Image: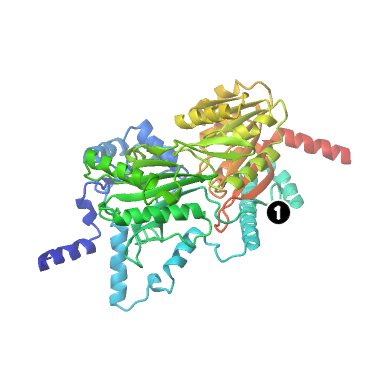
């Protein structure tokens, strides 16, 4: 390499805006939207831009929840100019929006590298200089409780759950003053909590419990070799390094073996590891799903400029490797391939392609057999999932004549586990393939009292409830981490048939607003008697991490207040 070439390379590395020269960045076409309303949701803002105003935004960034300003990116100058024209002085929730063209943000990886280089030059200590091995960094980011006894982990998680419930009680009391006296009585009865909290549930299996993992293919900083594992940090924090998973206790041995064997394939391949900074290279990801002596692998690569013949050759090679070659010790039973162009944009992720072996794997929960496809949602801890669903049934207390409305039903796992406890199960899910899987799972288990429907909960809940055979309807809600759409909650509230809601949350703090919305007072926008918390239980699905599931049972306020009044009359 010539001196000139070396100089150019250094300049490129040190320039945090060099990425704008490449064609994959939307930072070139960014605007700042100012004077946003005091209260709004990101999904609500996204729908305004893309569904109502048809502005084709690419991504939206804010500094915090309900920020008065946001940055919106577009794929080209034409879309940006159109957005500026439409949004300038547009009134949203009574606020006149103000629009400015925004400068692109610097590449965080390059920016961080420059800062570290400058700190090193000035002998200034940085956090990256702290004595911490790669293995410790990896454990701290993936299993932060790796050095905490399990009994202590449960205590810490229970304390976190209590903090969420206390905050919920205070906020609900503030939002609905009619409930204030009742909440104070609840707090007196339940040690400051707005409802009874049962003992935490947990599985005896605390290690090797994950049945699904998405491993990144990258470069190990210690060995400088292509490695299949987990990121030890993040791009935003200035690192793309990947560390090996050998000593992570939550990953099963079968997956670790498969990872090592696939890693051997990557290292011997002519294809390169994907470089997220420059968007070069091919190997990006390995997704693994395991269940009862079955192992599904999905090999994800960026095709770059590979021809169809070259891709076909790669697929043939990977099939031979795992079916009859050196990869047979991995004991793969199902092999898929996937093109991953831009991980952040769902439109750029091509559906998986079955290459070899079985098309599905099968798992058993509460005596029921479930068919699992590569894209299907399934709880990552099978034994924990059984405890979770039993807890939901316990809190719901369905009668033989009840209809269970499974909202965000996925492939039907929760609803089908309720099926022999009630007269009818009706599932709702926005993803069509999940509904196909749910119906197949019902047939697989000879369950005839269930039906599943495609659509957004906020749009079809009312129509589906008309199909309920009885007047006692229990809604079971298990939404994504961000929680349920506000419209869906208000739709549940306005349907008088729904007497009870069992809410399953994998991120209780993020779902806090949902909890409060169930209990808001009636208004022009919110119809139906409030639903208040009566019982809750924590379920530890993720040992050695800080995450914990929370299940809360909500009941109609008029029934709870009526029961309370009757109880007080009996006492007097």
Label 1 CA crowd tier, 10 Å (few <14, some 14–19, many 20+): some
Q: Pick whichever, 86 or 291, lies toward us.
A: 291
Residue drawn where x is 32% and y is 41% of the image = 58
Q: Pick whichever, 191 or 245, lies toward us.
A: 245
Residue drawn where x is 78% and y is 38% of the image = 564
Q: How is the image coloured?
A: rainbow
Q: Is residue 414 visible?
A: yes
Q: Quadrant of residue 47?
A: top left
Image quadrant where one finds the N terminus: bottom left
Image quadrant where one finds the C terminus: top right
Q: Please indicate whether residue 342 sits to the left or right of residue 289 in the image.
A: left
Q: Position of residue 189 (x, y in %)?
A: 76, 50
Q: Is residue 68 visible?
A: no
Q: Please indicate whether residue 93 sits to the left or right of residue 118 in the image.
A: right
Taking the view exactly as shown, the residue that stands out farthest to the front is 324
Q: Quadrant of residue 222?
A: bottom left
The total number of labels drawn is 1
Q: Which residue is mark 1?
A: 192
Residue drawn where x is 26% and y is 48% of the image = 25
Q: Position of residue 51 (x, y in %)?
A: 37, 32
Taking the view exactly as shown, the residue that stands out farthest to the bottom is 123
Q: Position of residue 430 (x, y in %)?
A: 47, 31
Say what secondary structure mark 1 lies in.
Answer: loop
Q: Please indicate whether residue 410 sits to the left or right of residue 134 in the image.
A: right
């Amino acid at each position: 390499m010539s001196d000139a070439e070396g100089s150019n390379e250094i300049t490129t590395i040190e320039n945090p805006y060099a990425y704008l020269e490449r064609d994959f960045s939307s930072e070139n076409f960014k605007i700042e939207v100012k004077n946003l309303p005091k209260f709004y949701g990101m999904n609500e803002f996204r729908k305004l831009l893309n569904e109502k105003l048809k502005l084709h935004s690419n991504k939206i960034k804010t500094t915090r929840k309900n920020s008065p300003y946001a940055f919106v990116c577009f794929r080209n100058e034409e879309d940006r100019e159109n957005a500026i024209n439409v949004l300038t002085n547009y009134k949203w929730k009574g606020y006149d929006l103000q629009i400015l063209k925004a400068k692109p943000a610097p590449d965080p990886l390059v920016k961080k590298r420059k800062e570290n280089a400058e700190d090193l030059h000035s002998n200034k200590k940085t956090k990256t200089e702290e004595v911490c091995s790669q293995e410790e960094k990896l454990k701290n980011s993936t299993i932060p409780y790796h050095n905490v006894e399990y009994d202590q982990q449960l205590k810490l998680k229970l304390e976190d759950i209590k903090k969420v419930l206390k905050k919920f009680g205070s906020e609900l009391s503030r939002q609905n003053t009619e409930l204030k006296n009742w909440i104070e009585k609840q707090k007196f009865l339940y040690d400051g909590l707005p409802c009874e909290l049962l003992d935490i549930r947990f599985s005896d299996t605390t290690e090797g419990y994950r049945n699904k993992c998405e491993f990144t293919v990258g470069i190990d900083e210690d060995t400088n070799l292509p490695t299949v594992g987990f990121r030890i940090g993040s791009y935003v924090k200035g690192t793309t390094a990947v560390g090996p998973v050998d000593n992570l206790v939550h990953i099963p041995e079968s997956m670790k073996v498969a990872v090592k064997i696939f890693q051997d394939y990557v290292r011997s391949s002519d294809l390169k590891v994907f470089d997220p900074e420059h968007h070069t290279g091919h190997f990006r990801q390995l997704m693994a799903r395991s269940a009862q002596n079955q192992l599904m692998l999905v090999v994800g690569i960026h095709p770059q400029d590979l021809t169809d013949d070259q891709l076909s050759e790669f697929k043939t090679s990977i099939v031979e490797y795992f079916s009859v070659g050196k990869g047979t010790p991995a004991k793969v039973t199902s092999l898929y391939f996937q093109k991953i162009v831009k991980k952040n944009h769902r439109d750029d992720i091509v559906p998986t392609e079955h290459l070899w072996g079985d098309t599905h794997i099968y798992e058993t929960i509460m005596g029921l057999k479930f068919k699992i496809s590569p894209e299907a949602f399934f709880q990552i801890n099978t034994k924990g999932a059984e405890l979770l669903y039993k807890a939901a049934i316990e809190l719901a207390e369905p009668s033989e004549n009840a209809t269970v409305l499974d909202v965000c039903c996925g492939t039907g796992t929760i609803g089908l586990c309720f099926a022999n406890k009630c007269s009818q199960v009706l599932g709702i899910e926005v993803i069509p393939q999940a509904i196909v899987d749910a119906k197949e799972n019902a047939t697989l288990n000879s369950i005839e009292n269930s039906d599943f429907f495609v659509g957004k909960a906020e749009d079809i809940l009312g129509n589906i409830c008309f199909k309920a055979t009885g007047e006692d309807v229990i809604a079971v809600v298990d939404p994504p981490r961000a929680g349920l759409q506000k419209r869906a909650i208000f739709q549940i509230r306005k349907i008088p048939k729904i007497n009870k809601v069992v809410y399953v949350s994998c991120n209780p703090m993020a779902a806090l607003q949902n909890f409060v919305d169930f209990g808001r007072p009636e208004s022009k926008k919110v119809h139906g008697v409030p639903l208040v918390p009566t019982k809750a239980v924590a379920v530890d699905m993720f040992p050695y991490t800080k995450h914990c599931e929370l299940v809360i049972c909500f009941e109609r306020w008029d029934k709870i207040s009526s029961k309370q009044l009757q109880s007080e009359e009996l006492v007097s």
